[in-house]
């Protein structure tokens, strides 16, 4: 005979799985943003080492367009700022999601512990 979980536990576990999936997405997105930010910072550093009158080209789709150092630098600094803001938001989301997962896990353990034989909590995780 298969024992079913109480509906409350099933609902919390379903919510737990959805939040865990969202967390995995946020972590992947944070990783991409961190890589992009590192690339922008690297290009800015390389740009600083170049003379002011150097010819610089940037890719626009399938075309390379000539630009000046200052315009490229300003564009990259704006991109860096945007990425830093996005990274901060993603880190906050990640922290909140991890906290919610811990809370739900505790509730599920409590509900299962209360429904199990003896009803007591046991050591281990």
Image: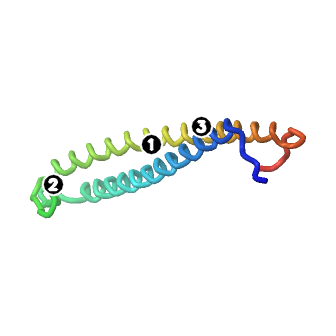
The residue at 11%/55% (across/down) is: 67
Which one is in front in this view, the residue at disc 3 or the one at disc 1? Answer: 3
Q: Is residue 110 above or below residue 41?
A: above
Q: Is mark 1 on a helix, strand or loop?
A: helix
Say which residue label 3 marks: 100
Mark 2 → mark 3, Cα distance in angstroms? 51 Å
The residue at 44%/49% (across/down) is: 30
Q: What element carries label 3?
A: helix
Residue farthest along the left direction in this orientation: 66
Contact, mark 1 vs mark 2 (Cβ under 8 Å): no
Contact, mark 3 vs mark 1 (Cβ under 8 Å): no
Near mark 2 (Cα within 10 A), the count class, few <14, some 14-19 or many ≥20, is few
Between 55 and 79, the residue placed more toward the observer is: 79
The residue at 42%/51% (across/down) is: 29
Between 68 and 119, the residue placed more toward the observer is: 119
Q: Could you tell whether 13 is left or right of 25 in the image?
A: right
- In terms of image quadrants, where is residue 74? top left
1 or 2: tag closer to the N-terminus: 2
Q: Could you tell whether 12 is left or right of 70 in the image?
A: right
Say which residue label 2 marks: 52
- In terms of image quadrants, where is residue 89? top left
Find residue 96 and report its horizontal and vertical position in percent: 54, 37
Say which residue label 1 marks: 90
């Amino acid at each position: 005979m298969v024992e079913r979980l109480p509906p409350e536990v099933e609902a919390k576990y379903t919510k737990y799985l959805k939040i865990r999936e969202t967390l995995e997405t946020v972590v992947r997105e944070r990783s991409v943003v961190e890589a992009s930010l590192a690339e922008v910072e690297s290009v800015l550093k390389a740009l600083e080492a170049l003379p002011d009158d150097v010819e610089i080209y940037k890719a626009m789709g399938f075309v390379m367009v000539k630009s000046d150092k200052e315009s490229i630098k300003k564009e990259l600094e704006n991109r860096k700022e945007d990425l830093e803001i996005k990274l901060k938001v993603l880190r906050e989301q990640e922290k909140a999601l991890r906290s919610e997962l811990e809370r739900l896990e505790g509730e599920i353990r409590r509900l299962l512990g209360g429904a199990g034989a003896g009803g007591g909590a046991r050591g281990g995780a």
